[in-house]
Amino acid sequence: MAQHASLLIESCSELLTIRGASLKPKTGKALGGLGLIKDGAVAVSGEKIIWVGDTSDVRKHVRITKETETIDGRDMVIMPGFVDPHTHPVFAGSREDEWLERLAGRDYLDILNGGGGILSTVRETRKAKKQELVRSAARHLSGMFANGTTTIEAKSGYGLTIKDEVKLLECMVALESIQPIEIVRTFLGAHAVPKEFSSSKSYARFVADAMIPDIAHSGLAEFCDVFCEEGAFSAHEAQLILESGIAHGMKPKMHTNQFNDIGGVKAADIVRPRSLDHLDVLSKTNMAQLKRIGSIAVLLPGGAFFIGRESYPDVKSLISAGVPVALGTDFNPGTCFCYSMPFIMSLACIKLGMNAEQAINCATINAAHAIDRGNTIGSIEAGKQADIIAFGVDTYESIPYSGATNQIEVRIKKGRIV
Ligand code: NIG
Ligand code: FE
């Protein structure tokens, strides 16, 4: 007998399934397809999607009863919830003062080297109690969810001691129990050099030899990340840290080429991170290296926009070279106070020259792959988790077109309308 649906969305103007890429991220021409079904239907049982197809067929395959909650998808575009593969949402204090300084011409790395920037957030975050951090992060997450994000990757990195980094990761665990967004946790102990250390070299050693074993033992982080940049960590230090992470069971990720190319991509050739993030400064040599490495290039145009950069990475060349690309917000108090994936998709189209199809794939299935979740989320296919959003628009092009305006009408997490 056909399986009973607890939830049915039918008569969708456009259903974007994003199907067919659960095992590997989409690259090249595949980024042009959305698996679009007109007058489509999705049936859900409990937390999972059980059937996807034409509305006219759904009753032949799935049992719909008066217990089935039904959503009329007419005049709506239905798609998988956004996956934001790069955020820094747990922090205290604010950085408007630094933003004003930057508007007046001061450089981001110059502020960091003077003990401000990331380090000013570290000072505030160390002082803050767990409950305060959870309360403010919950606000940010609620804004993310309102804008259609159903899963995020979240980084620590504003503690920079074992105790304070653990505090941030524990806040993320607490956050999962009080709001709908799922959180994939990343240890970013190597975000900046704290004032207690005289050099990046000595702190990198401490991260690799003392922090990583403790964090790994706590089981609080799935990924390990590092900020490879002038004034933060060298390519060699990044490699040392990520290799220690791997040895302790944490998968590598890397912030690199945000402001300068100091050899991060070359180091990645050895470490093979799951993703290389930012890549705002990218040479032809880097492109060739990226293709060989196979890491997902997580582009964060919100950061470049917020910082006021003139130039953006050459995504067309990345895509035609076959590099898997994803999009994220990089939500953080310093370089991007924006948690809206639709707005990031607008930027990706306007500033990076992506088309609507590429932006949507990069914000869903490819973003899921960037955090190793391609097999469970990021598309609407039978067997996958029912993380679904509905926009009150007629065509999918409207989503990046109107990214600065929130037009989401329904949000479903794990089969439940929230
Ligand atoms: O991804 N660049 C390093 N880390 C963050 C910024 C963090 C901050 O400024 O607080 C980023 O841009
Ligand atoms: Fe970041």
Image (cartoon, rainbow, N blue to C red):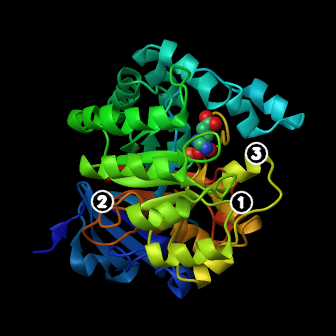
Label of residue 385 in the image:
2
Which residue is drawn at the image coordinates 32% and 36% (left, top)?
209
User: Do callouts 1 and 2 mark residues in contact (Cβ within 8 Å)?
Assistant: no
Sequence-first disc among 3 and 2: 3
Find residue 231 and report its image quarter. Answer: top right
Secondary structure beneath label 3: helix
Secondary structure beneath label 1: helix
Most distant residue in the right direction:
104
Which residue is drawn at the image coordinates 41% and 24% (left, top)?
161
Q: Is residue 16 above or below residue 97?
A: below
Q: For the residues carrying marks 1 and 2, which lies nearer the camera in this image? A: 1
Query: Where is residue 35 shown, x and y percent of the image?
Result: 46, 81
Query: Where is residue 297 shown, x and y percent of the image?
Result: 53, 65
Q: Which residue is mark 1?
A: 347
Q: Which residue is mark 3?
A: 307
User: Do callouts 3 and 2 mark residues in contact (Cβ within 8 Å)?
Assistant: no
Sequence-first disc among 1 and 3: 3
The disc labelled 3 sits on which kind of residue?
A: Ile
Q: Is residue 108 above or below residue 268?
A: above
Sequence-first disc among 1 and 2: 1
Neighbourhood count class around disc 1 (C-alpha, 10 Å): few under 14, some 14–19, many 20 upward: many
Most distant residue in the left direction:
1
Secondary structure beneath label 2: loop
Which residue is drawn at the image coordinates 31% and 54% (left, top)?
415
The disc labelled 2 sits on which kind of residue?
A: Gln
Quarter of the image with the N terminus is: bottom left
Q: For the residues carrying marks 3 and 2, which lies nearer the camera in this image? A: 3
